[in-house]
Image: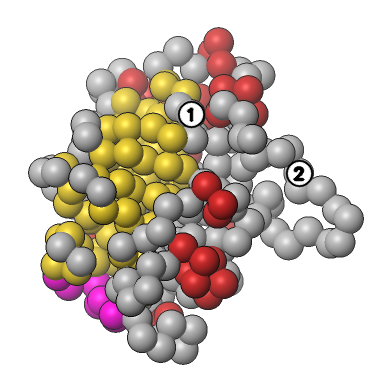
Amino acid sequence: MRLPAAILVVSSFLTTVALAKVVSWIDTYADITITTFTHSDIQLEHQGKVIHIDPWSVSDLSQAKPADLILITDDVNHHLDPKAIARVRKPGAPVAIAANGRAQVPDGIVLANGDTREIAGVRIEATPAYDIKPGEPYHPKGEANGYIVTLGGKRIYIAGVTECVPEVRGAKNIDVVFFAMNVPLERMEPAAAIECLSAIKPKAVYPYHYDQEWVRPVPAGGKRPQPTTRGLKELADALGRQEIEVRLANWYPQ
């Protein structure tokens, strides 16, 4: 059984992050149920409809509900995991993918940056997610997606792995954003994340995809490292002063 996030993620510095909300792995926003699995693996539920974003086999998918819709942001295994997709997908449920996912999800619905479609009765906006700073790993413009999902009148933004490019900082009327931090090559350092989120002005933020060491493959018999908390306090303090709620979830269980 999974323990609460307060024990596993931020217990060592909880008293210093006064402006953040430490959430259980099952949380709610309005009438939307949000389940935070691992790294960037998210489940959204609203009025009986289940949407899964970037399901990953490292997660405890025995706790996942069968998905009516799956969204995939990128083609890296911790985003696009065919076994995890098969595990959570209802028969015939649509899978929306970025252009780089065609080979691994042949029946996927390819959404280009800027596309807006209703899929499985849900409005989905595919947003750009890309890098400017050169070096590997590199996400060129047009290859990967973020998504804005509208549920119950609320706009949920899964930003994906991206720098603070104009299309990201220009996202409007966002209620909840899942925002990556500490991405490789210092492309989204805590200060840059704070600046970008200050421009977006969401009502609530879930920092996610912020421990790149934890997600590296582990040799047989090995253990994953202790999860980092780098930047979480700074993010919570800075955004809290702007009345933007920061929600800290247990993305990296031990």
Q: Amino acid at mark 1?
A: Ser
Q: Residue at x 17, y 51 (%)?
A: 150
* Quadrant assignment, res 8: top right
The residue tagged 1 is 24
Secondary element at image label 2: loop
* Vertical side of 74 occupied by 99: above or below: below
Mark 1 residue crowding within 10 angstroms, few (<14) / some (14–19) / many (20+) = many
Mark 2 residue crowding within 10 angstroms, few (<14) / some (14–19) / many (20+) = some
Q: Residue at x 38, y 67 (%)?
A: 90
- Asked if one can make out residue 79 in the rendered structure from this viewpoint, the answer is no
Q: Is residue 231 left or right of residue 150?
A: right
| Residue 113 belongs to the span the image colors magenta | yes
Dot label at residue 225 = 2
Q: Is residue 86 left or right of residue 214?
A: left
Of badges 2 and 1, nearer the viewer stands 1
- Color scheme of the displayed model: secondary structure
Q: Residue at x 56, y 72 (%)?
A: 83
Secondary element at image label 1: loop
Q: Amino acid at mark 2?
A: Pro
Query: Could you say where residue 32 lies in the image, as x and y percent from the top left?
Result: 26, 39
* Vertical side of 243 occupied by 2: above or below: below
* Quadrant assignment, res 95: bottom left
Q: Is residue 24 left or right of residue 150?
A: right
* Vertical side of 109 occupied by 156: above or below: above
> In the orientation shown, which residue stands out farthest toward the right?
221
Which image quarter is the C terminus in? top right
* Quadrant assignment, res 207: top left
Range covered by the magenta-colored residues: 109-117
Which image quarter is the N terminus in? top right
175 vs 31, nearest the viewer: 31
